[in-house]
Amino acid sequence: MRTKLLAVLTFLLISTQAHAQIIDAIGGHIKDIQNRFSDHQKIDGKILKSGEIDKNAKGQDLIHNSSGTWTLIQVGKDLYLQSDENFRSSPGPDYHVYFSNLPAIKDNEEFSNKQIEVGKLQKPNGASFYKLPTDKIENVNSVLIWCKQFKEYIGSANLKLLN
């Protein structure tokens, strides 16, 4: 009797957790769709680096992908990552922006604590900007879009110095 009760309770707990994750994913997708129609958000400053999302990266597939330009912009002493109006990503529930001083990762297995989270992706289609927690240009050599909930690579770009 005790074993059956424990089995039922375990099933209910797992089932409840799965339902919560599904509900979170649905809510994230709804927010993603709403943000696709929001206005572009741009910041004015000195453009230091720029790069294109690598559309041939191993982690890109039909469901998990992005494209477009990202730039590193300096305003005073502050640094910002800016997605361009041409930025596009596949729909997702929990996309976040990361940066690193290393080259861009190309797939899920490469994700590590060397990628520094900036915040939730604000606009999955178009321009938005993100203040970085560093003021050192050499700390920002790549940008990554990552689905935090499902641990999925969405896209990345190496950022190169502009002359």
Image (cartoon, grey):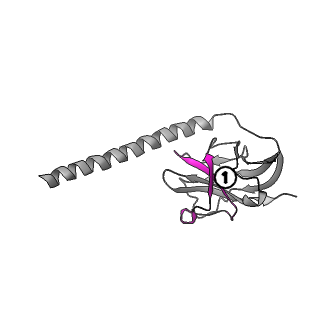
Rendering coords of residue 152 (x, y %): 53, 56
From the viewer's side, name the closer residue of 27 and 12.
12
The quadrant where residue 129 appears: top right
From the viewer's side, name the closer residue of 70 and 114.
114
> Which residue sits furthest right?
163
Instruction: Residue under label 1, please give it.
Output: 67
Q: Is residue 139 left or right of residue 3?
A: right
Rendering coords of residue 134 (x, y %): 72, 53
Which residue sits at x=48%, y=38%? 27
What range of the chain is rendered magenta? 92-121
Q: Identify whether 138 is placed above or below 76.
A: below
- Report crowding for label 1: few under 14, some 14 to 19, many 20 or more residues within 10 A (C-alpha): many
Which residue sits at x=26%, y=51%? 10
Callout 1, which amino acid?
Answer: Ser
Q: Is residue 73 left or right of residue 130?
A: right
- Let me know if residue 6 appears in the view: yes
- Let me know if residue 90 appears in the view: no
Rendering coords of residue 57 (x, y %): 62, 63
